[in-house]
Image (cartoon, grey):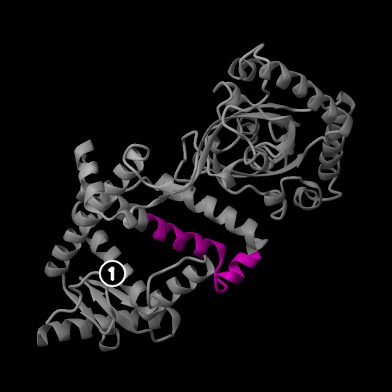
Amino acid sequence: MKCNKLIFSLLAMCFAFALQAQKNVIDEVIWVVGDEAILRSDVENRRLMMQNESMRYDGDPYCFIPEQIAVQKLFLSQAKLDSITVDEGNVLRYVDRWVNVTIARVGSQEKLEEYMGGKKLSQIKEEQKRLVRDQEVVKEMQKKIVGDIKLTPSDVRKYFSSISKDSLPMIPGTVEVEVITIEPRIPLEDIDAIKARLRDFTDRINKGETTFSSLALVHSEDLATALRGGQTGLMSKTEMEPEYANMVSSLSDPNRVSGIVETEYGFHIIQLVEKRGDRIDSRHILLRPRVSEQETVKALERLDSLQKDLVAGKASFEEAAKYISTDKDTRNNKGLLVNKNEESRNFGSSKFEMEELPSGMGVVVDKMQVGEISKPFRMKNNAHKDVVAIVKLISRIKPHQANVSDDYLELKMLVENRKREEILEQWIASKQKSTFIRISDGWKECDFKYPGWIKD
C-alpha cells in the first residue's frame, strides 16, 4: 500500500513537472493507469470538445470522462504489447477531412485556431492525429479481443424470447424507391459564357491583377471551399472527381492556373497548392450554368409523357431508368436508389428513412402508395444540380417494434452487439485486476460503469 502511494506520488510529480516545464502551468494528476497519467486538463479539454460537438454522455462528466479515458488507456496498453498498428495514411486522410469540414463550418483557418484556444493549425493537426490514431488502435484491439461472433437463427430467437416486449427496439420507418432523373438542357451559349468567365479569371490572375483565392472567395459556387479561398485541403485522388484528379495531378507549378475542367458538379479552374505523397491540396473556382425555366418546363413535360406511358404499362420503370435517366449511379442500378449516408444505419442498402431522401424527394414519396409512380417534380441531385425526376415507391415499412420475422438482421446485429459488450466488459474487469490504478481522493466517489477502479 505504501509502495503504491509512493509510485503514485512520484508519477504525479513527474507529470506535473513535465507539464509545468512545457506550459509553465501546474496541472493535477487525477488518475494513473499503469504508467499513464490522466490530468485534470485532459478531462476538461475532452468535456469542452464534447460540449462543442453536442455529444451526449451519461451522468457527471467529471466521472464519465476520466473513466472513458482510463478504459482507452487499458486498450492502448494491451495494443502496445500485441504490436497493434493502424494505417497511417487513413489517419492522415481522416484528419484532413476533419480539418476541411471544421474550417468550412467555422468560416476560416484563423477562426478554427481561435476556436481551439489559439493553437496553430499544425498543432491542431498533430493533436487530432494522436486522437484519431489512438481511436483506431483501440478499435483494432477490441476486434482482436472479441474475435468472430457467430450466431445461429436459434440464438437470435432465444434472445428475442428471453426479453420483454417493452425492451425490444423500435425500428424506424423506411422506404425503397426507384428514380429517373433528367437534367434540363443547358444551351451551348450559356456554357460558353461560363467558360469565358473562367478564362477571364485566369487572365486576371496571370496578369497579377488579383489572386486566385480572392476570386474564389467572391465567385466560386462551391461554398464550402470558397470560404477558404477555394482551397480543398489535402485529398487523395480517389476522393476527387476523376476529371478533377487527372487535371490537378498534371500540375507542378503552384503559380499556374489549369485549363477549364468539367465534372458532374460544373466547370472548374484549378491551382496547385502542394503535393504530399499521394495526397494533393489545391484551390478551385467552380461555376455552374443556370438552368432556365423554359428548359426545366421542357424536361418536366418529357417526364410527364414518360410517366403516363409507365403507368399505362407500355414500358417498365427499370428499363426506362436504364436508358433514359441521366444519373449514372441509379441508371446503372436500374433506377434503384442506394443510401450513401455513411452515418445512416442503412448505409449501403436501398432503405432510407424519410429524412435521408434527397432534398425535394421526401415530400413527394411521403404521400405515395407502394407501386405508385409519381408525377414529375423538381429536386437537386447529389452534385447540387437542378434536375427533374419521377420516382416509384418500391416498399414502405412503417415504424414498429422489432420482431423476428420482419427484422431478423436488426435483431441479429443487436445480439452481436450485446455479445461484443459482454466480452469487452469481461476483458476490462480482468485487465483492471492486473493493472496498477490509482485515483485521487476527490475522484473516488463516482458511480463508475466498470467496477474495479477502486482497489483496497
- Residue 164 is situated, as x and y percent measured from the top left of the image, at 28, 56
Residue at 44% from the left image edge and 85% from the top image edge: 24
**Quadrant of the rendering where the N terminus is positioned:** bottom left
In this view, 126 is above or below 60: above
**Does the magenta-highlighted stretch encompass residue 119?**
yes
From the viewer's perspective, tell me whether residue 434 is left or right of residue 251.
left
Of 452 and 414, the residue lying toward us: 414
Quadrant of the image occupied by residue 442: bottom left
**Does the magenta-highlighted stretch encompass residue 455?**
no
In this view, 12 is above or below 191: below
- Residue 97 is situated, as x and y percent measured from the top left of the image, at 54, 50
From the viewer's perspective, tell me whether residue 327 is left or right of residue 428.
right
- Residue 114 is situated, as x and y percent measured from the top left of the image, at 61, 71
Q: Which residues are magenta?
A: 110-133
Instruction: Identify residue type, mark 1.
Output: Ala
- What residue is pinned by disc 1? 70
Residue at 57% from the left image edge and 44% from the top image edge: 354
